[in-house]
Amino acid sequence: MSKIENKKKKKILKRTIFFIICDILVLICFFITYGPWDYLRTLYVTTAMKTMNHSYLARIFYSEETIAEIMNSNYFVSINDDVDLDDIVIDTSEKTEYVDEYEEELLTRDEGNDLYKVIDIEVGGSSGYLVAIYDPTKVELIHTEQFNVGTYGERIITMCDRYDDVVCINGGGFVDNGYGSDIPLGYVIKDNEIIWTPIGEDENTYRDNIIGITNDGKLKLMSNATGTEALEAGIKDGMVFGPFLIVNGKELEIVGDPWGKSPRVAIAQRKDGVMMFLVIDGRNYIDGASLKDMITVLKRYGAYNAANLDGGQSSSLVIDGVLTNNPPAEAKRTNGRYVVTGWGLKR
């Protein structure tokens, strides 16, 4: 056999293998999409439909009627109650007796660190971090230097350094152009002042779900509130996102799996005042945590009030100037995505 014939055979073999692999992938996609596994079909549609930028992924394979049927059978019922601050009595001192092993793990300080503790956790094969904060009065809102000036916002690692905070997570949503923007979605409140109201809205009439921290370090969740009402309720720092996962010990009612699994971030507080940052890693639209998973972890560690924050590519946990979590690949390569707000722990 000549060298030319041998090369031709090798090329044919490579092409054949390539097309076989393509056929196998197509068959796998076909069975996931149209096969008997409702869970996979639901997971695909709900994760794709979470944002307008990715909803086309669901429409490639399904009709609008099928998508509507799936979405209508996977939903949550928002909690409309506001947090009762009288239920939170701040006493974060170490104890001699604990309710269970999780409380003991949470409240037992690391040697030489009375400010915070990082607990490694796992959710369905995805890694995560629960940060216990022992002085909730040191939690503050962090944000970009300016809003709506035509930039991409700011990475949490940069924001955290500028505020000189020791632990930071990302916060609320923003106008999403695929990379990030400096236009917040909803109110931003800092140091007892409303510093951002959505364009064209009025702080006395525009209503939204506000996640806030009071002057005495209590997590205040307000449903359908105006910015003025938030200030009157004692919110010092605040922003908008959701849903609220736990309010006054009551869990969000979830039917099915409305948002699928994804990298997620949450802020929470126990009745004794201990604040918690929860960050779960994952790959966009493939794995991570569901809303139910977040509630399960937070309740395990005694959360009495909790709210979901922006997740996906935005998920960021910065500790001592280092991006500690493992966000989806694109964000990891750039040391975090551009966002507009977050929460930080003062040194």
Image (cartoon, rainbow, N blue to C red):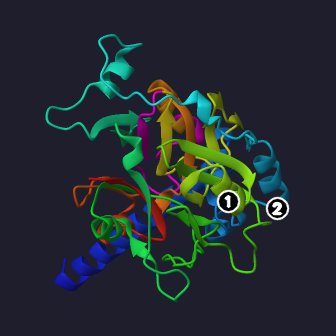
* Residue at image coords 31%, 77%: 11
* Residue at image coords 60%, 50%: 234
Left or right of 105? Residue 172 is: right
Q: CA distance from mark 1 to mark 2?
A: 11 Å
* Residue at image coords 60%, 75%: 175
Q: Percent position (x, y) of residue 70?
A: 77, 48
Q: Percent position (x, y) of residue 262?
A: 51, 51
* Residue at image coords 63%, 69%: 185
**Which amino acid does the dot numbered 2 rest on?**
Glu
Regarding residue 147, the answer to whether it shows in the image is yes
Q: According to the image, label 1 marks what residue?
A: 49
Category of crowding for the residue at label 1, using alpha-carbon neighbours closer than 10 angstroms: few (below 14), some (14–19), many (at least 20): many
Stretch of the chain drawn in magenta? 272-293
Judged by depth in the image, the label closer to the viewer, 1 or 2, is 1
The magenta stretch spans residue 279: yes
Find residue 64 and name its label: 2
**Which amino acid does the dot numbered 1 rest on?**
Met
Which quadrant of the figure has residue 292?
A: top right
- Depth check: give the residue in front, 209 or 178: 209
Mark 1 and mark 2 in contact? Answer it, CB < 8 Å. Answer: no
- Depth check: give the residue in front, 298 or 225: 225
Q: Tag 2's secondary structure?
A: helix
Q: Tag 1's secondary structure?
A: loop
Left or right of 312? Residue 205 is: right
| Residue 164 sits above or below residue 305 on the image | below
